[in-house]
Amino acid sequence: MGIITCIIGGSGFIGRAVVDALLARNDRQIVVIGREPFAPHLPPSVRYIQNASGATDELLENVLSQVDEVIDLAYATVPQTSFQNPVNDILVNLPEAVRLFEHATRWSLRKFIWVSSGGTVYGHAQQVPLTEEHPTNPVSPYGITKLAIEKYAHLYHQTAQLPIVCVRPSNAFGEGQRVYAGQGFIGTAIASMLDGRVLNLFGHEGTIRDYLHVHDVASGIVAALVDGQAGEVYNLGSGTGHSNRQVLEMLAPLAQTQGMPVHVDVLPERTFDVKVNVLDSSKLRSHTGWVPALTFEEGLWQTWEWFLKNYKA
């Protein structure tokens, strides 16, 4: 157990799955940095450090001096909130990321994974599935800030040899995802059915997204950590798209078995929504051997069953 991995944002939805994926390898010690005072859902073997309001230079130096790898999942906004306050989206995310890169260059890290966004950095698709070479013209402040951080990551790789890898995940879903949070359509759709709430659909079909179960997102991030090449950018997705309408049609029979009607309100399309986002992950597969373990249908059923047993409004 010679390798120590630090996961910043490791107590969140994707972070918890990454912790589980790393623990399953049984070859690493894990340190998690998170915002909450406590993280009781993390296994006892995981060391937890609270970072409530931005990591101090002292905390970063102390942690980075003791670890071999970093996975940075921390991000303070979501696409919807980025439109509400674009300046805040920059200020709460970009300086913290660049400061972390600056500190990381002072230590001999084996690998640094920065988790970007495959759903927002590309903008409107010229063809699908999207490869890493597709033009990046994001149409949200969130996507622009994510892309700016990628550029800084590339800068530190080129000028300071920081062994950084950028991973662009598609839309994660699964057990335990936050609902009504401005992102996470599947979790919010299921919660709306369980709560008897009306679900808004923007356009008759909604948007088409590449949904990937959170366990497969986590295994892809770990694959990039273990076998990804420093300086590379990797898409992380299923390669298959489903519209919001298709997702609801697949969930409807499950809701009907519980006597739950599906209430949908079709609203006009939003100008800032990218209509289609489906990722080509062949480069990650080629470099690391990663493949998803779950089909979309399997992941959707698992997610429904979890919410049915555990969700409380």
Image (spheres, grey):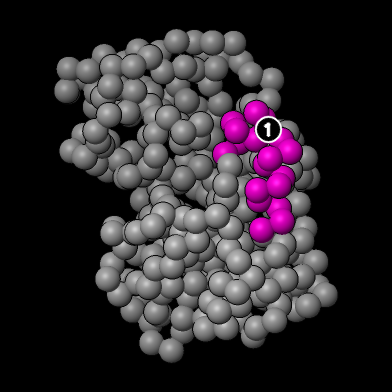
Quadrant of the drawing holding the C terminus: top left
Where residue 281 appears, x then y in whole percent?
58, 54
- The residue that appears at 55% across and 30% down in the rendered structure is 208
Instruction: Give the residue at x 50% y 27%.
Output: 243
Q: Is residue 226 left or right of residue 197?
A: right
Given the image, on which type of amino acid does mark 1 rest? Asn
Residue 95 part of the magenta segment: yes
Q: Relative to 3, is 87 above or below?
A: above
Question: Quarter of the image holding residue 225?
Answer: bottom right
| Residue 125 seen in the figure | no
Q: Which secondary structure class fits the magenta region best? A: helix
Quadrant where the N terminus is found in the figure: bottom left
Q: Which residue is mark 1?
A: 85
Which region of the structure is painted magenta? 78-96
Tell me where residue 70 appears, x and y as whole percent.
55, 71
81 up-or-down from 155: above or below: above
* Residue at point 50%, 35% (across, down): 183
* Looking at the image, residue 181 lies above or below residue 154: above
- At x 33%, y 79%, the residue is 26
Q: Position of residue 264 (x, y in %)?
A: 40, 13
Residue 236, image x and y in percent?
A: 55, 54
- Label 1: how many Cα within 10 Å (few below 14, some 14–19, many 20+): few
Q: Is residue 124 above or below residue 204?
A: below
